[in-house]
Amino acid sequence: MDIEDKHAQVRALLKLAPYFSEPLLGETLAVTREMDECDAQATVLAGLAPHLTETLLREALAAARAIGNWNARAQALAGLAPYLTNVLYTRLYSQPS
């Protein structure tokens, strides 16, 4: 993505997410993993949650768990939690962070 300002990038991704196809949402997750700002990652992961399939939620959960900053990781996980299936929710609490 060519948007330099991280806040503008986050806003753009979240505004467009409802219109993305599943493959494009997958690409958005890949872009999110590459962001160098953990707060931006957390915001995008939480904002994408309502639009993700179960498969993509698994990827988002893995991305959230990989965030190094505990505060940002908690923000991402809190945003994802309402959309997790029982299996994913159990996985969230059964694996160490």
Image: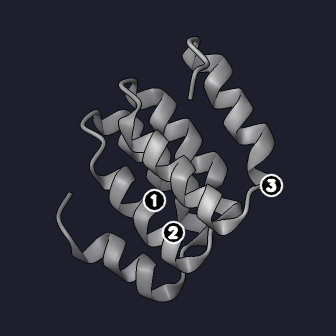
In primary-sequence order, the first of circles 3 and 1 is 3
Residue, far left: 96
- Please report the residue visible at 58 percent of the width from the left and 12 percent of the height from the top: 5
Q: Is residue 56 left or right of residue 7?
A: left
Marks 2 & 1, CB-CB < 8 Å contact: yes
| In front of the other: 10 or 75 | 10
Give, as a three-letter code, the residue at label 1.
Ala
Circle 2 sits on which residue? 57
Residue 10 point in image, percent of width and height: 63, 29
Label 3, secondary structure: give it: helix
Quarter of the figure with residue 50: bottom right
Residue 31 point in image, percent of width and height: 47, 41
For the residues labelled 3 and 2, the Cα–Cα distance comes to: 15 Å
Give, as a three-letter code, the residue at label 3.
Pro
Q: Is residue 75 left or right of residue 9?
A: left
For the residues labelled 3 and 1, the Cα–Cα distance comes to: 16 Å
Marks 3 & 1, CB-CB < 8 Å contact: no
Quarter of the figure with residue 1: top right
Q: Is residue 37 left or right of residue 46?
A: left
Quadrant where the image shows the C terminus: bottom left
Query: Where 11 falls versus 59 (above or below)?
Result: above
Residue 96 point in image, percent of width and height: 17, 64
Give, as a three-letter code, the residue at label 2.
Leu
Circle 1 sits on which residue? 60
Residue 75 point in image, percent of width and height: 48, 42
Query: Where 12 falls versus 31 (above or below)?
Result: above
Circle 3 sits on which residue? 18
- Please report the residue visible at 41 percent of the width from the left and 31 percent of the height from the top: 35
Neighbour tally class for label 1: few under 14, some 14-19, many 20 plus, Cα within 10 Å: many
Quarter of the figure with residue 25: bottom right
- Please report the residue visible at 47 percent of the width from the left and 47 percent of the height from the top: 76
Label 1, secondary structure: give it: helix
